[in-house]
Amino acid sequence: MSIQARKAVICVFDGLRPDMVSKETTPNLWRFAADGAWLRQARSVFPSMTRVATTSFATGSKPQTHGVVNNAFFHRPVIADTALDTSRADHLALAEKFHEGRFVEAAGLGCALAKAGKSFCVVHSGSAGSAYLVNHRASHNGQWTFSIHGREFTRTPGAVDEVIERFGPPPRSNGAPKFQEADYATRVMTDHVLARLQPDVALIWFSEPDTSYHYRRIGSRDSLDVTRKVDACFGSILDAIYSGPDAADTLVVAMSDHGQISMTGEFDLIGALKERGFKATDRMEEGAEVLATHGSVSGLSLVNPDAIRLQDLAATLMHMPQTGMVFSRDGENGDAAIAGTLAYSLIGIDHPRAPDLFWIALSSAAPDLSGAPGTGLFTGGVGVPIGGGMHGGLNPHELNTMLAFGGAGIESVGQIDDATDLTAIAPTVLAMMGVAAPDTMTGKPIAAVTGQARPRSTRRRIEAEFNGFRQSLDIVELENSNIVLGGGREV
Ligand SMILES: [Zn+2]
């Protein structure tokens, strides 16, 4: 392996839609992407939720390999009565205990770096679960994860003590936008991590613009202001890198974990199922028949397995006008087990922990109040107001992510249309640094970035139909994986 970069700095902007990156709003990101390699057809994974995306990025694999199948999902051996919430430190601790340290079933970027004797530092401003999943073996591997939320939000609390001693307590603003948090995290990154700790790989995760998209609307003034803020933070980080001793040897990645679309209405999925004779609920209770999670995507499982009843449930969902897509496990011939649905393997979610069915709310490319394309429905019950942004499904505007590479080893090619997804980023960074990727890393280095010959790719549309319900999925087949471009109901 030839070494093109000795160090790497990865900057993650949670939820940032690449079509919000512009010369006016995000001059630093815009210039960086234009001068480097900007993958305009980069995608998240399914479900396009932060903790699933985080784990897929970190392990370079899809949920079928790493096992984190949703932000919150029913995993009754671990949590009996409610969904396991992967944002919560206590739920994750129980899951790790039950799975004997193998809740995340794949090795991560951190593991690969540790094995090669390289250091890895993370500055995180998201939930305890996200800070854990971005490097789930940090404590075991003697690495460093700082959380802006305090000691109990990371498995390496010494990092928090160290930072607070030097910079004072982190800010705590109520709600969105989170300007002060972005500034504080950036200072920790530039003045402490890059200047003092000088790790081989450093990562910073900004919780914005995701938080403001959710609670202040995608195209609102607050969302634009906080996007400008995190862009300015990115500018400060670039300045710190390029004025430092490793300027010529550092690969830089700017990325997001998913996009968002605007919610035009709530649909009470559980209520609608009850009206149609299914005892549906979001928590285990007496007489419960169907367990369902909330959001623009719902995972649905029968409490007692029953193939006929499951077919009835899928047919009922496909009959609802609020339904966008329905997926089920693979059947014997490689198609979905249930007629009219699409198969889990197509979207990389065929894992034993996955629910019986995934339901995705209806969405389209129709513009929202500010003119941004992408609107849809959700179940409510997640604290996001109508008009706010959501993600989780397969709308192209939820799936399309920001992804640009620059610095050491990167040719200035500007925008390119090679399809890729989150699972390819860690393998690309490792390949550029000459570090071997773990066997579980199913994503492959992005040829357009590493300078290798591009693999053969075929674009395909897969369709399914049941009693007037028609859905389709657009994928790009690469050598041994699918990039999911998007999908939806055909109307
Ligand atoms: Zn996110």
Image (cartoon, rainbow, N blue to C red):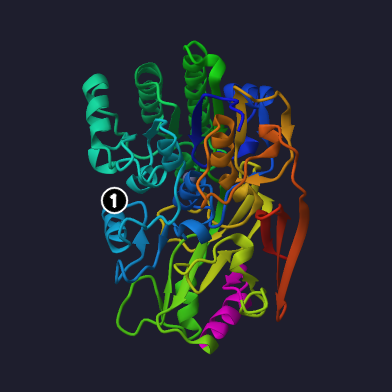
In front of the other: 466 or 95: 95
Work out whether residue 323 can be spotted: no
| Quarter of the view holding residue 289 | bottom left
Q: Position of residue 441 (x, y in %)?
A: 53, 49
Q: Residues within 10 Å of mark 1 (few under 14, many from 20)?
A: many
| Residue wearing tag 1 | 89
Q: Position of residue 14 (x, y in %)?
A: 49, 40
| Quarter of the view holding residue 143 | top left
In front of the other: 252 or 393: 252
Work out whether residue 35 can be spotted: yes
Q: Position of residue 16 (x, y in %)?
A: 55, 38
Above-or-below relation of 227 to 485: above
Does the stretch in magenta take in 354? no
Above-or-below relation of 439 to 460: above
- Say which residue appears at 47% left-offset and 20% top-offset: 237
In front of the other: 228 or 310: 310
Ligand 1 contact, mark 1 (Cβ < 8 Å): no
Where does the magenta region start and end?
Answer: 309-330
The total of numbered circles placed on residues is 1
